[in-house]
Image: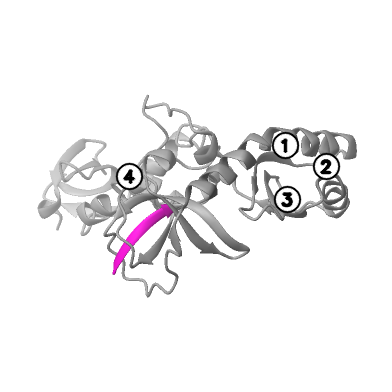
Amino acid sequence: MANVLVSIYSWENPKIYRSNIELKKDDKVIVPMENGNELGIVLEIDVKTKDDLKEEVVRKATKRDAETYEKYEKEKDTLLDRCRKEIKESQLPMKVIDVRISLDGKQATFVFTADGRVDFRELVKVLSKDFKKSIRMQQIGSRDEARKLGGYGICGREFCCVNFPGSIPSITTDMARVQQIAHRGTERISGLCGRLMCCLAYEADQYRSLLEGMPELYSIINTKEGRGTVVEINAMTQEIKIKLESGKYVAIKKEDIK
């Protein structure tokens, strides 16, 4: 029994499944999902996880499965064009990103982004009548949209959310604060998706460790040369810049704090 990481939907994180079948990377497999079996692609083999996995790979995808999947992929543009036209005519505040037709052909899942809740009941009725399928609308966040569309960040590298197929961690302003870059403003620490950059999570724990025992910025501390206010902290060099009551600036090491 091995654990395998499988990509099913382009807008969702890959899922880990148990497998009694011998698989290799890039194999197409059939896996259970909430609304029935779907085709997915194996990204990794022997994935380590602490989760108690209950879902298993159903089987390898057959040639017929693959042909059916490709057939429905070719129909996506027609469905998307019709959906976008109806959204525009109905003036709904939403943006459709993608659509996936289920392997049995009975359901179409439209994925969209929106600033808030959207009443799409009439839209579902129209699309269901047009395509003779059960219609499901799924709202996703801007970070998931970026993963779906792909692209390159200001660093010149491919988006982190695309490069790393696992779960996207929760990025917080505290990660920017602990790395002392929160003062740069949200525009400079946000990605093209408009959310805080994923790379803020990479070194946050190391910075927290380095800052242990360091005083807070603008706190008052005692030094060998007198009392002063902390005006700058360098986590990497473990140095603290202080403005003394005399007006003089000094730089001291963490161990020199009284």
The disc placed on residue 116 is 3
Residue carrying label 2: 92
Looking at the image, residue 77 sits to the left or right of residue 132; the answer is left
| Quarter where residue 50 is shown | bottom left
**Which of disc 2 and disc 4 is earlier in sequence?**
2
Residue sitting nearer the eye, 148 or 157: 148
Image-quadrant location for residue 21: bottom left
C-alpha separation, residue under disc 3 versus residue under disc 1: 21 Å
Q: Is the C-beta separation of discs 3 and 1 under 8 Å? A: no
Q: Amino acid at mark 2?
A: Leu
Mark 1 belongs to which amino acid? Leu
Query: Could you tell me the amino acid type at mark 3?
Result: Gly
Residue 219 in view here: no
Q: Is residue 5 magenta?
A: yes
What kind of element bears circle 1? helix
Residues drawn in magenta = 1-6
Write down the residue under mark 4.
179
Q: Residue at x 85, y 55 (%)?
A: 121
**Among the two numbered marks 3 and 2 on one chain, the one whose residue lies closer to the N terminus:** 2
